[in-house]
Image: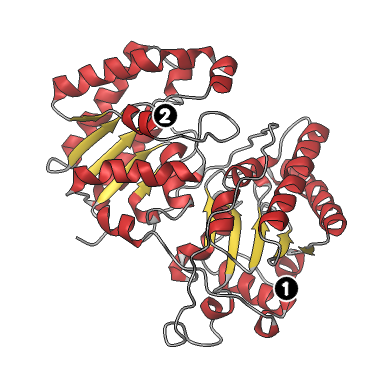
Amino acid sequence: MKMVKRWVSIVLSTVILSTLVACGAADDKGNTQLAATQVPVGTVQELFGSSLFVGDSIIGGLTNDDLLPEANVMGGLGATVQTTLDNVEEIVSRGPSHVFLSMGQNDLGEPLEEAKNTFEQEYTMLVDCIKELLPAARVYVLSITPIEEASPVSALMNPQIETFNEVLQKMAKEKGVEYIDLAPIFRQHKIQYDEDGSHFTNAFYPILLDYLKEWTDMANQSRGPAVTDPNEAYKAAFSDSVFLGDSLLGALSYLNKLDQANVIAPRGATLDFTLPNVEKLASLVPEHVFILLGSNDIRLSDKQEFVERYRQLIDSIRNKLPKAKLHILSIPPVAEEALKQEPRYADITDFNQALEQLTDEVKVDFVDLSPIFATNKIHYAADGVHFKPDFYPPFLDYLKELVK
């Protein structure tokens, strides 16, 4: 069965995260040089083959129309600087010789001075981590792109973006990395935005790469081995599956463990938010649907509401995909720090018991994830709810048995 190649859900988020993380240990690179015949010399894929573009969903658009392989892009929906810090080990593991950092719109917030200080602290730590763990890599900091002038939020957000860009330029100079101002692109071209006024149509991205190619003189730079994709086995195993849920699953595409077409998992998703995505899920016609929801719902609803909304979601999927095998995943535990911040996480066990009873009643598969935590040392991200990249291989290995 052929899956739809690309689906990107567009959501603007203004999340301010103030907790900082320390640099993680680097993994072995294990990259190999691509044969010259695989990528035509002089194409953007060849020029940027050893580069990694890291940031939010705006830079994630570089994979649109197969412009760049997903191995060269880490662009997550709703991603912040803290998100990138939490996943710095993944950046290191890909072994890029050039790292392009592009994020910031999701870090905007009020009060502005507090948001700006948090942004500067986290971005500085990110650059320090990358320079420490990839000392030979060349690091570029891209300016935050503006909001379309016609957008009703542009008058509020664009002045903040200008302020944040001043912070970026100053930080880059202090850290000895290169700041690339993208403003000339918008003066020289009529850039078409998507409907939200923040993201861009696919036509923007070749223009962006041409600009970066000239700005960096990439054709004459020394470049290392091409970044390769070590996740083909996972992508093949789950090629007829779709993972539906929140950002705990969204990391699967952000980290390139699975193709983006196999993951529908926006940041902050709840059961109510997921119901409208059933149409998109149905259009993919998967054989298996893995659903992981609840980490956000548990803070917003009681157990009875949670069960009834989950029942509605299951019924809706069954109505659209009567032949698909549904796998309902238990809500993962959180770290002690997260429990202190949000006492309602103490109800995870009760919610999971209710969820297991529901799956037994409606005759769908319940997958208890607790054995993963019992047999592996799980590393949490700074918020104590999300996970470091090393969680996802044992997670996918655990689920592979269900799709054989």
Q: Decide: few, some or many residues near mark 2? Use Cα within 10 Å; few <14, some 14-19, many ≥20.
A: many
Which quadrant of the view contains residue 331?
Answer: top left
Q: Are marks 2 and 1 in contact (CB under 8 Å)?
A: no
> Residue 307, percent across and down?
29, 18
Inspect this view and state whether residue 207 appears. yes
Where's the N terminus, which quadrant?
bottom left
The answer to whether residue 199 of the structure is visible from this angle is: no
Q: Amino acid at mark 1?
A: Gln
Residue at the image position 76 percent from the left and 37 percent from the top: 118
Q: Identify residue type, mark 2.
A: Thr
Could you give the CA–CA distance between mark 2 and mark 1, rounded to whole angstroms? Answer: 41 Å
Return the residue nearer the eye: 296 or 156.
Answer: 296
Q: Residue at label 1?
A: 188
Instruction: Report helix, strand or loop for mark 2.
Output: loop
Residue at horizontal 57 percent and vertical 64 percent from the top = 95
For mark 2, what is the residue?
270
User: In the image, what residue occupies the spot 70% across and 67% down?
Assistant: 136
Left or right placement of residue 277 versus residue 111 in this view: left
